[in-house]
Image (tube, coloured by chain):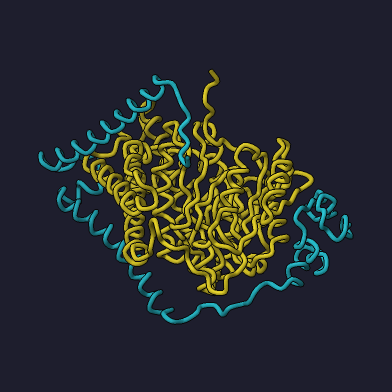
Amino acid sequence: MMIVKTPRSTLVAALDCLLTALAWAAFCFLFASGVQSLLVGPAPAADPVVSRLLPDAQALLAYTLVAAWIGLLLAAWACYNAVRFSGIDRRKPLGDTLPAEMASHFGISPMQLQVLRSSRTILFHHTDEGRISMIDFAHDADAVCDSIQMKQ
Amino acid sequence: MTDRLLAFLILCLVAGAPVGAALLWTGNLILDFVFFYPLFMSGLWMFGGLYYWLHWERRWPWGPGTPPPYLPGLPWISILIPCHNEVQHGADTVLSALGQRYPRIEVLAIDDGSTDGTGDMLDQLAESHPRLRVIHLARNQGKAMALRMGALAARGEYLVCIDGDAILEHDAAAYLVAPMVRHPRVGAVTGNPRVRTRSTLIGRVQVGEFSSIVGLIKRTQRVYGQVFTVSGVVAAFRRKALDRVGYWSLDMVTEDIDISWKLQRDHWSIFFEPRALCWILMPETLRGLWKQRLRWAQGGAEVFLKNLPGIRAWHYHRLWPMALEYCISTVWSFALALSLVLWGAGLLVQLPDRIQVETLMPPAFTGMVLAVACLLQFCISIFIDHRYERGLFRSLYWVIWYPLAYWLISLLTTLWAFPRVMLRRHRARARWESPDRGIKAPTP
């Protein structure tokens, strides 16, 4: 149910499969020519930095070492953080947001916020600048008021 | 004015760095950077993914019969669902949110000025589901505003935000909130989006991409300690943290990247919870994919430009590697573009030897290493992710396109979006555009 597979023409589906098979073929070609270059002799001169300085096996070792160095750097950083902050709460609990803080942030009163939070259907109107201009509760049968007009 | 000068300077530096390197050294040096940078990033992501899995993830219980995570104090969770023209998928999304096993939830569906009847559909749903509340915005205001209004009306301290076409797994909300309840420093938790749309090649490639790239990057960034962005489609926030940073910005095209940086600049941690599964619809056409990725690239550039002046102080040094990685990725795009230009120009005219690019194919040996690195990355990501999605290995066949698709799209969108953002005069309010949510079946 989660996976969506829209039916498509057999031809298009076959084309996708064929193109992907070709991509795999190109991948295998890259791999095979690399192995061949290792077996036959030194790497081609198109890669001056590596082939001029290092024979292939050493270049492979260099790649591996650089990869290992990057990995170790990341692991060392993670371990350093784990040790440094072990058992320490880096931030004291700040408590829940107070309704007054919340209301002031949006330019409404705590009382209006309370009405807002107790309503099940709300309609917001905004000014062009993005400020709330009116809050309408007309569609909410249980609302304590019909609307709140905001001061601009 | 200073901001615009800074943006222009950044553009000159990023675009000019490859040109300068080619003139100072050789064109082949640029080509080496073009080949080796993805290789080393791939290595880093694989290592980060494996470290995360070995250190934490493999010990976390998962599978049929696993009870939902216990949240001490049973806090209220508000699930916010901003919807714009979601009449086709909105009901499934809302019902999946209402179907959470955690008992203390409320669902707020925010109809952001829809014109397709989404508002009426949500009102009807609310009549039969007491835990559903509906917020209407009289006019289309954008996702950031919809989330702000949802947060204002929500009763819970923990806000789980999902897109209007996403389907939450039944314990996802509890998994997302659990780290925030346990650790006071956690301000947000990002979930694990899984691609639903798998009809076309583009859809199937993204299945592999979300495992091979998104999953591994998120794990690696979590090992490092900072996250470039939460997933906008599924993330949870602590209200206190949002209140301190001023909630979602209205003028950022990717509000998820922006809020991630705002929170981390206020020293909140962002966690990744791979067990918080959310099934998402992704573009299945090239046009849809291009539009989506262009928006992501533009959003990344906007956030980079917005935050760069502010994170210079040592106080924010943990964010520097994130900014640096973004910067190098952008330089990489310009370097590849320059290599293409030099190679093309070399076919037409005789260039000086030092800036001549003879071939765009990676040298055989390097090509082999790249191919092996790609295959290894696919295998590692599928090994880590397969417990969340059985049969994921079947996507291995299609994932061969990912290196080309990912790096090529990354190249083109960066080249298009980065200069546009850097040269733009003002940021406008960001509003919705209906994205591509998969192809439609042909009518008989």
Chain coloured cyan in the rendered structure: A
- Number of numbered markers: 0
Q: Is residue B427 visible from the viewing direction of this image?
A: no
Percent x, y for residue B1? 69, 54
Q: Is residue B42 visible from the viewing direction of this image?
A: yes
Image position of B370 (left or right of A42): right
For the residue pair B307 and A89, the one nearer the viewer reads as A89
Percent x, y for residue A128? 81, 48
Q: Residue at x 41, y 55 (%)?
A: B217
Q: Residue furthest front?
A: B128
Image position of B240 (left or right of A2): right
Q: In which quarter of the image is residue B249?
A: bottom right
Q: Residue furthest top?
A: B444
Q: Which residue is drawn at 55% across and 63% down?
A: B188
Percent x, y for residue B67? 44, 63
Q: Residue furthest bottom?
A: A87
Percent x, y for residue B43? 31, 54
Q: Which residue lies furthest to the left in this view?
A: A40
Q: Residue at x 50, y 50 (%)?
A: B278
Chain coloured yellow in the rendered structure: B
